[in-house]
Amino acid sequence: MSSIGEASGSGSGGGASGSYIPGSATPSSLTSPLQKTKSRHVQLVEASGAALRERQWSTGGPGRPRPSPMVRSPSAYSARSAYSAYSRAQYTSSGARTPIDPHSPRASISTFHLQHLLESLEMDQYDTFGVEELRDGFFDATFYRSTAQQGGEDGGSSDDEDGGFFGVDPGKHFRSTVHTQIEDCGYFFTTAFRSRSGIRLMKACLGYFIAYVFCLIPQIQSVLGKHSYWVPIAALFNHAGRTVGAQIDGTVGCMLGGAFGLGFGCLALEAASATAASRSAYGGVLAAFLIPIIALLSWVRCSLLRFYQGIIAAGIALMFLCLVETDDIPREGSLTRPIVREFAVPWLVGLGISLVVNLCLYPEAGSRVIATALHDSMESALRALVLPRTYSLEIHSNMSKQLVNLSDAVRDMRNEATITALEPADVEQLRNLLQSVIRQIMAIKPETSLFDHESCQPPSTPSGVDNPHDVIINIHSGDSVDVASIDGESTYETPLEVVRQTMAEPARNLVTTMAAMLRCCDNALMRIAGLADLFDHEELFDVELSREELKSAIDAFDRADAILIEHPSLPSSYSTHADLVELFLFINPLRQAAGAIDSLADRVLQMSRDPKARRKRIFLPSYPFWKAIYRTNPQVRHDRGGVSAGYYFRIKGEINSIMGKIHARAYHPDPDGGPADEGMWRKQAGIDGTADGDTLRYRTWKILHRLQQFETKFAVKVVLVTATLSAPAWLRQSSDWWRAHDSWWAVIAAWLMMHPRVGGNAQDLLTRTIATVVGAAWGGFAYGAGSAAGPGGRPYVLAAFAFVFMIPAVFRFMLSSHPRSGLMTCLSFTIVSLTAHNQPEAGQSAAEVASLLGIGLVIGVVAAVAVNWVVWPFVARHELRKSLSDMLLNLGIAYRGVVARLVSFTFYLTVACAH
């Protein structure tokens, strides 16, 4: 009769020293095969045939290991070194003892992970004040493999591997840049000609091209007026590459926004030309109207995202009336030309062209978007159900991405009008069920040895044991802990083989039927949605039959699990059986995932039996109004730029709002041990309108505090840029060259390029400047080539140049990750080419027109980026620091609630037991 004891120590080199635990002897005859295992990072050393000493890192010497990343193992957890990790975990590297009993049934696999991570820390460089948190198996967490561990054996190359000056190889950097550009070109051709995004691109380009051709026809151009380029600009800003609901929403918003801007612009012009005094100071009057209204529009623009398109249109219309040809006011007493008509008519024509193209050419009413989101989610779940397999960060990240995409697709569907057979209420239920399925599948550990025995025979009976289910347990009471071990080396494999023989076949059948059920649900939903390209026409799927097969597999799995739980060969404690824990970490989540898939199948079966499911119907927006005004459709989110930052701030705001409500709650248990009445804590928290939180002083503070947020800062920045760039239009000394060179385009370019969240950096400034110059140069070159062809051939040459250039330019605007530089490319080409075409009597050459207008646009771009960059800039590291602080605060709030309820429950349970 012997026992397995533990000792822990550390090497020299300034590290903490451990102490020998009395009564801990480990005879070599009782050493488990698990203790003899040598992994790449953990090595067990037996000294004097008696004590188990501290492991040494393979990368370090006999002393303390060198600083290394937090997790160095290429797998999330090495089950083979679990027992060894616990043997070494009696002392942390800081020297403070961690009294975790490795044989306690409360010890869990998360504690293995925690100890594995703690041992790689240089704890003596931190002052812990003698405080240490011991979870001892409670509040288990799931640890996933990091991205850095997916590389080679060392997790990546060293910093100086590239060579070159300061570790950077210029040749390699150049080759990488060229390779990136080639990949971008390949992505353009693939997206434009081999995917459904090419249809959206074709619709947007066609709408723009038709609007551009309208400006080249002399009869139509004479009706549209001198500023006919507003037709293609409007067709570009609300391009036709959207869903029908988003297109109608954008058209109405641009019309109302343009009317709002024109209304206040006309009011400003009337006030400036009303009296002789106002005419002499017309610049001050126009500025008094323009600046406060632009500030208000800027605040609403970044606060109520639903009105983004209308706000942009209102700002453009207001700036156009307040800046274009306003020097006629002191000379003529008013504007001599119908300036309002020259903006309103082309703007409406451009919006109408985009709307007609969107409705007549491959209209997408919203059904494909939500159906594709459902299909992609099920495809990600099916890829994850290929079990067993090695852990794949790509598969795991894809499932996490689908969780977010599915929620966004459902919100977008409810936020606009759709024509589909999928009812929004049903889609919302499918979203919840499918997200539950994905979460349960993400909890499954794909690397499992459960199926290793499929080609092996059942294990033979160990010698000295009459019954294979009889296990001799030797118990020894030592000075430190009570140790229980299974006698003999070969008996350790017996529980593993019991689990494998019992659960392998039911688990395999369950995985197969789960995958078949998901494919069947996917096929049924795609048939209901009417997407013929997303389901298999040759293979027939019966939802009801597949669900019966899944239920049979679940029942068989449950019966096997019940037999396994009562099996006498299983040990009473799993702390020394890390491989068994790994098997159960695969088995239990698998059963939960099967239940989630069964619930999903039940809902899909109900939908397939509904006679209304085959008919497409019109569904009006059903998203709550106070949520809808803060959300816009996906294409507008892309076109305005900063999608990632927008997601981050939106989610962060929602979390802070929820945690603020939780933080305001005061937990007061009632005498029965349950939570207090809701009205009580609402009154104490001051959120029921009866406490101090509803006073005038508090409401005033809340409004003033709200005005200090980023919306007000953005409004100040826009006013600063607008007032600075608009000043030459209202001064007599500069009004002539301002009007001659159409310098007001600098103000509109800055209005379009300003962003409330991500203003840009040096790379963005360079990219947008180059894009603007390229567009202006191509527009000047097109006009020069058209002039060489003569007045009769100029429209055809301009149309040909526009057709060739605008396909990649519109692609960059609406499909790439750089929408604002693409927008400036399209605008600069349109403005330069059509301005030169509409004013041939000005006598300016193509190079002169392109350079002057291009300089004005570049000034607007540079001013927008520079002000965003300098005044209250968006700094990622600052946002990270504040977000980490908020996260720690939220964790503290959540932990406080858990502890409060746990202590309260323990107290009342103690009282009840005492009575």
Image (cartoon, rainbow, N blue to C red):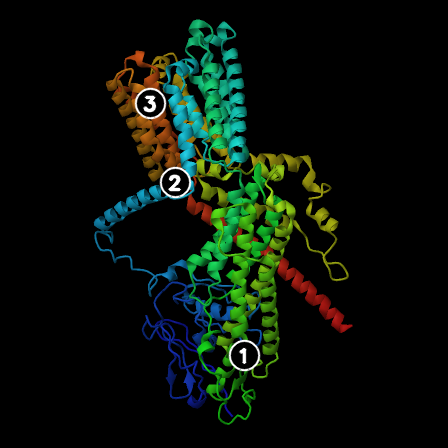
Q: Nearer the viewer, residue 97 or 859?
A: 859
Question: Residue 103 bears which disc, if any?
Answer: 1
Marks 2 and 1 sit apart, C-alpha to C-alpha, by: 56 Å
Question: Residue 816 bears which disc, if any?
Answer: 2
Residue at 61% in and 64% down: 548
Foreground: disc 2 or disc 1: 2
Foreground: disc 1 or disc 3: 3
Mark 1 and mark 3 in contact? Answer it, CB < 8 Å: no
Marks 2 and 3 sit apart, C-alpha to C-alpha, by: 24 Å
Assign a secondary structure to mark 1.
Answer: loop
Q: Hey, what amino acid is under mark 2? A: Ser
Image position, residue 588 (x, y; %): 56, 69
Q: Earlier in the sequence, mark 2 or mark 3?
A: 2
Does residue 253 appear in the picture of this structure? yes
Q: Hey, what amino acid is under mark 1? A: His
Q: Quadrant of residue 223?
A: top left
Residue at 42% in and 47% down: 877
| Residue of label 3 | 832
> Looking at the image, is 89 positioned above or below residue 589?
below
Mark 3 neighbour class, 10 Å CA radius: few under 14, some 14 to 19, many 20 or more:
many
Q: Is residue 829 left or right of residue 607?
A: left
Q: Hey, what amino acid is under mark 3? A: Val
> Looking at the image, is 256 positioned above or below residue 407?
above
Q: Is residue 548 left or right of residue 397?
A: right
Assign a secondary structure to mark 3.
Answer: helix
Q: Earlier in the sequence, mark 2 or mark 1?
A: 1
Image position, residue 581 (x, y; %): 52, 73
Mark 2 neighbour class, 10 Å CA radius: few under 14, some 14 to 19, many 20 or more:
some
Residue at 53% in and 47% down: 371
